[in-house]
Image (cartoon, grey):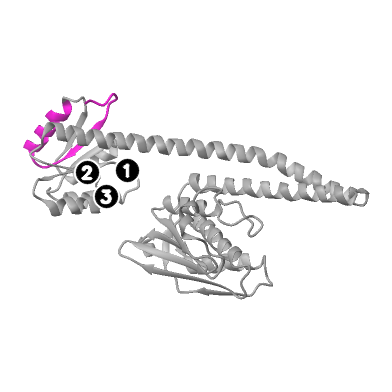
Amino acid sequence: MSIPYEKQILIIDDSPESIELASCILKRSDFTIRVAKSAQSALKLLQFQIPHIILLDVTMPEMNGFDFCQLLKNNVEYKKIPVVFLTASDDEESIKKAFAIGAQDYVTKPFKPAELIARVNTQLKLMQRTEDLENAYKSLDSFSYSVAHDLKSPLLSIKRLIDFLLQDCNGKFSSDEKTLAVNIQEKTREVTAIIDHLLEYSHAGSKEISINKIDTNKIFFETYNELHTLEPSRKICFHLEKLPSIAADPILFKLLCQNILSNALKYTRKKDPAIIRVTCRQTEKYLVFSVTDNGAGFDMRYVKKLFHVFERLHSAREFEGSGVGLAICQRILQRQGGTAWITGKPDKGASFFFSLPCKAADEL
């Protein structure tokens, strides 16, 4: 089955026979083919035009296919290109290694025409759907930002009018009229806060990433102190273990810390003392941070709801909030190759975990 729009395939293989066979099969399905017989030749071709898919041989001179694939996946310009390895049918270890370093699929030699075309078409369709989803996300972000931004201005005007009304006419109001005006004032604040969170959510998804070396100890400590000044009378035991420096976006990481620690402080408000502990451990590929508290906790049956916008497990009467903070955290982390998860028990506290790839911060 041919693709209804032109798609370009880069074949990287040092075997003339394999190149000839693959090219003949794919050209019959109207693919545009480019060929490189080494990693260095492939890199030169990539500088001029990025293909829609790469067929990559395992064994090549200068640099083998695994190292070249790793090079691609570490480069922000090339990491999204689907890579299909070309390997011998009995080379199970190569197939496992290919998937481990980020390859999307493999095709065994000698090629079977139907299999090669089917696997290439599958990856192209997946790539197209991914692009469509990314474009839909961008459109949704733009729409959300526009709506939130346009709503905020009139809401702030309403809030100012209510403030003036309460100041100038306070003595003229009956008890019921004053209560009504105060309720309007409070609801205006709540809606304005929700809009601010929507703008933050949009910002977390659209802001251009700028990777720098970050002192995570400093950011967590400063963020906690800023938040604690809002509730200076509370008794809080804040334990901050020695944390590593990381390579990440400073602005987004600060926003991440604000949302995590705000949650911990909010849900420990009924504890005396509140206990919040921040730690980090390193795995082979990731740094895993944890923020643990002794607060209200939650029922793990509903854990999947926590990272959805406007989903809440506690009523607004118990704890204020819009249900956007954790969704912002997840979005920030996913944009930098990480993820978040959370565990807890009712009235036994919660632990917020997040991971980020191990990157050489000292080299930045």
> In front: 97, or 251?
97
Q: Mark 1 points at which residue?
A: 80
Q: Where is residue 297 in the image (x, y as percent from the top left)?
A: 53, 64
Query: Secondary structure beneath disc 2?
Result: strand
**2 and 1 marks in contact (CB < 8 Å):** no
Distance between the alpha carbons at the discs numbered 3 and 2: 9 Å
Distance between the alpha carbons at the discs numbered 2 and 1: 14 Å
Quadrant of the image occupied by residue 33? top left
| Few, some or many residues within 10 Å of mark 2 (<14, 14–19, 20+) | some
Indicate which label's residue lies in the foreground, 3 or 2: 2
> In front: 220, or 125?
125
Query: Secondary structure beneath disc 3?
Result: loop
All told, the count of numbered labels is 3
> In front: 187, or 143?
187
Q: Does the magenta stretch include residue 260?
A: no
233 sits to left or right of 361: right
Residue 63 can be seen in this image: no
Q: Where is residue 294 in the image (x, y as percent from the top left)?
A: 54, 71
Please report whichever mark, 1 or 3, sits nearer to the chain's N-terminal start. 1
Q: Where is residue 160 in the image (x, y as percent from the top left)?
A: 78, 46
The vertical placement of 228 against 323, above or below, is: below
69 sits to left or right of 222: left
| Amino acid residing under circle 1 | Lys
Residue extent of the magenta highlight: 1-27
Please report whichever mark, 2 or 1, sits nearer to the chain's N-terminal start. 1
Q: Name the residue under label 2.
A: 105
